[in-house]
Amino acid sequence: MLPAISSLTAISPTVTVPELSKDQFVEYRVTVSDGISQASDSVRIDLRNIVRTPLFVTPQLQVAASFTTNVRKLIGDHRFGLAGSANSEIGPLSFVGVKYSDGEFTANASPMPEAFTKPVDFKLASQPVGFGAQPHIGIAQEDQNRFRMFVNTSGDTFESLIDYTLDKPCSVSFGVLANGAPHAIFLGQRDKGFSILRLSSGSGNVGTFANLYRVDTSGRSFCALLSADTPVDGITFSEFRYLQDLIALDTDNNMISVFAQSGAAGVDTVQYALKQTTSVQLNATGTLKFVKATEVGGFNNLRSALAMLFSDGRHDGEHRLVIAGITSTRQLVQETYSWGAGIPVDVMLDNFDEDYSPEVIVLTSTSPYAVVFESMAANYGGFLPLGGPSFMEIGLGANSGLPRRLTTLGVPGMYVAFPEKKQVLVFGTPPRPERWGAQLTT
C-alpha cells in the first residue's frame, strides 16, 4: 500500500523559469508506483514576479572579481581597500588588501595582524574627522572587551595604534570636541552605556590616544551612536558647544536617547546630561530588530543624522529605514521609510547618480535589488525629507558594500560583496543627461 503523495518528503522538483512579468504558477501531475499499486496527485508551484519599480538607475557592471573565500565585509576609500572573509556568518573575519590594476583585482597578504571574532563593529575615520591623512580604522570587539585602532602609515600594512580595554564595546563613532579639536572616539557598550576617548594628533598626523574623557553608566546597550556635528536641516547651529548633541540608540529595546552638554565651563569640565528618551518611530505592526546603522547627511555635512535599519527577518515582512537627526534648534527629528520585500543587511550614504542630491542605499540579501532613498532637501546642506523607494538591480545575495563616493581603488564604482558567490562586483554610474544636460563619464 503506497502512502498518500502528501505524506512523501523525498520529492524535490527543481524548476527553472525565465524572468516573469507577472505572477504565475506551474502545476505538475506526480505519479509514484511500487510496481503493483500507484498513486497520483497534483503539485502546484507558485512563481512570483520579483521585478521592482520604479528604477533609480540601471547600474553598469564594471568589474566582477572572484575570490577563493566568502567575502563578508568591505572597508576602504580612495586610498585603500580591505576585504574581510569568513566561512560562516558568525565566523571570525580575516582581511586581505585589495587593489585593482591592469584589468584585474589583486590581493596582498593580510594587512591586519589577526582575525576578528564577531560580534565586531568597524569604522573608518575619514580625513574630514581630523585624524590626519593616513587611514585610521576603529574596531570594537565586544566579546573580547577590547577597542582597537589601526593606522596605515605606509605601504599595505595597518599597524596597531590603540589597544584599549572596556566592557562590551558594540559600536564605534568618531567626532570632535571643543569646536574642532581635540578629536573623540565614541564607543557604545552593551548593557554599559557609552565611553568617550580623546585622541590627539601625534607626529606625521597620526592620532595618538590621550585619555578616557567621559563615561555613561546608564546600563543601556547603545550599539549605534552619532555625535551630530551639523544640523540635519542644513542650517548652522546658533550657539557654540563643547559637546555636540549625542544620538544614542539602545538596540535592545529600540529606544533613542539624546545627550546634551551640561556645566559648560570648558572642554575639560563639561559633561553630558540625558536630554530625552523616546521610542524609535518604526510605524510597524510587529516586532522589528535592529540590523545596522550608518552616519548620513547632506553634502559637506556627513554626520548630521543616523540612518538605522530594522527588520522582522522575513523576506516579505516589515522593513524600516529610520533617519534620526538634530535640527538647528536642537530638536530631535525622526523620519521613517519602508519597502515591500528584501531583508536589509547593509546601509550606506552615496551620490551614485552624481547629481545634486545624496542617497541612502540599502542592500538586501533576499532580493536582487538595492533599495534607494534620495534626499529631497530644499537647501544644499540639508538632508530630509527623502524620496523613494526606488530600486537598482545588482544581484541576489548581497552582504556588504562600499559607496561610490568613497571608492576608486583603480576603478570608480559601488563595491558590493556576495559571500555565497565568492564575488565582489563593482557597479558604475550610467550617464544621466536628463539631470546634467550632458553625458557623464565614469
Image (cartoon, rainbow, N blue to C red):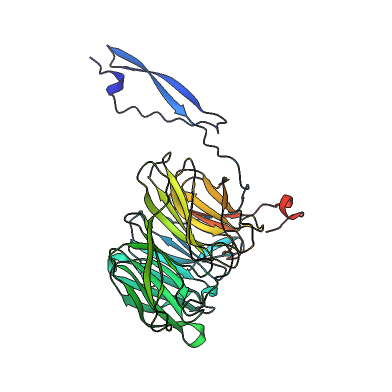
Q: Nearer the viewer, residue 322 or 211?
A: 322
Q: Is residue 422 visible?
A: no
| Residue positioned 45% across, 48% down in the render | 320
Between residue 339 and residue 423, name the one nearer to us: 339
Residue depicted at x 61% and y 56%: 377
* 295 lies above or below 345: below
Between residue 272 and residue 362, name the one nearer to us.
Answer: 272
- Image coordinates of residue 82 in percent, x first then y, are 47, 66
Residue 362, given in percent of the width and then of the height, sits at: 50, 51
Dividing the picture into quadrants, the one containing residue 7 is top left
Looking at this view, name the residue that lies furthest to the bottom. 203
Which quarter of the figure is the N terminus placed in?
top left
Q: Position of residue 305 (x, y in %)?
A: 50, 62
Q: Quadrant of residue 378?
A: bottom right
Is any part of residue 294 visible from this angle? yes
The residue at 35%/77% (across/down) is: 214
Q: Relative to residue 367, is residue 89 drawn left or right?
A: left
Residue at the (42%, 23%) spot, across then down = 44
Near-viewer residue (271 or 282): 271
Against 18, residue 36 (above or below) is above
Is residue 12 positioned above or below 238 on the image?
above
Task: Report the residue that reaches farthest toward the top.
Answer: 36
How many marks the image carries: the answer is: 0
Q: Is residue 405 left or right of residue 436?
A: left
Residue extending farthest to the right is 437
Q: Quadrant of the C terminus?
A: bottom right
Q: Position of residue 178 (x, y in %)?
A: 48, 80
Residue 147: name its quadrant: bottom left
